[in-house]
Image (tube, helix red, strand yellow):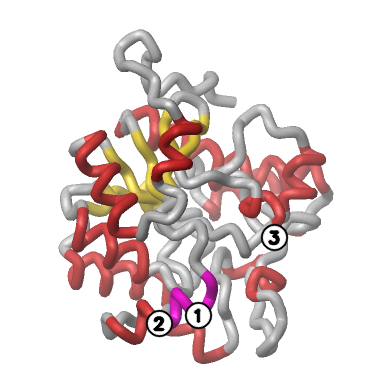
Amino acid sequence: MAAPLKLVDPNETERLDLDALNTELADASAEDVLEWARNTFGDDLVLTSSFGSDSAVMLHLVHRVAPRTRVLFLDTGYLFPETYQFAEELRQRFELDLRVYAPAITAARQEALFGKLYEGGERDLAEYQRINKVEPMDRALRELAPRAWLAGLRSRQTAFRAGLKKIDLQGNVYKIHPILSWTDEDVHHYMRANDLPYHPLRKRGYRSIGDVHSTQPTREGEDARAGRRLGVHSECGIHLPRVATDESLKSSGL
């Protein structure tokens, strides 16, 4: 496995008072949080995007407020064709500085050497996540070396995310969640108000979209993330601290 991340030397910059910041920004709009991030970190920002169901929201917000932000897209090699097409559509529409990171070993080679890890037991699933998601994400953060990482996580999505703060630390990089408090209706309203497209698979019932083999449609009224399964996990663990245990991954819903 890759060496532990060390993205920002804490001796090089004064640590932010996260408690004070989270109090100050508790009721701030997503635009205000992004403006604070832009003014604080300048161009040392990245936004992660899965180009999923409603990813256009965060991409549009960042395009408006912090357009020089680098956008990090993890290409596992197992995404839907529609996801690649959607990503290209939004890249062109918002003139994104898109940085695509893929696993060090291709999907075809993985399956030839190890079989379909995503169909195996917990050990195989953990290795699948490490190869296809955690390692590429760690490599991207090392190479891009941002001081802050923007993510469109929302507190109502999983139990783990319900405990997040708008401004936090993950390793030595600041983690910023501008739409953390948004509801599904907030998302839909913003999408309608700004004429933003949903992922094309949404109309077929896919409301939370990841890899082909671990994504399924959900019914109206059902939790959207019920459609994301990889063993006992409903998503990979790239947003969890690297010290998280297997039990933490399970309980988080990630």
Q: Which range of residues does the magenta coloring cover? A: 183-188
Q: Would you say 68 lies left or right of 37 here?
A: left
Of badges 3 and 2, the one in the foreground is: 2
Residue 169: horizontal and vertical position, in percent? 49, 32
Q: Which of marks 1 and 3 is nearer the N terminus?
A: 1
* 237 or 62, nearer to the observer: 62
Q: Mark 3 to mark 2: distance in Å?
A: 26 Å
Q: What element carries label 2?
A: helix
User: Circle 2: is it few (<14), some (14-19), or many (20+) Cα within 10 Å?
Assistant: few
Q: What element carries label 1?
A: helix
Q: Is mark 3 on a helix, strand or loop?
A: loop
Q: Which amino acid does label 1 sit on?
A: Glu
Residue at x-position 69% and y-position 45%: 114
| Quadrant position of the N terminus in the picture | top right
Which numbered disc covers residue 185? Answer: 1
* 153 or 207, nearer to the observer: 153
Q: Does the magenta stretch include residue 200?
A: no
Q: In this view, does 196 lie above or below 174?
A: below
Q: Is residue 41 above or below residue 2?
A: below
Residue position marked by numbered label 2 in the rendering? 189
Residue 165: horizontal and vertical position, in percent? 53, 44
Q: Mark 1 to mark 3: distance in Å?
A: 22 Å
Q: Mark 2 to mark 1: distance in Å?
A: 6 Å
Q: Are marks 3 and 2 in contact (CB under 8 Å)?
A: no
Q: Earlier in the sequence, mark 3 or mark 2?
A: 2
Residue at x-position 64% and y-position 56%: 235
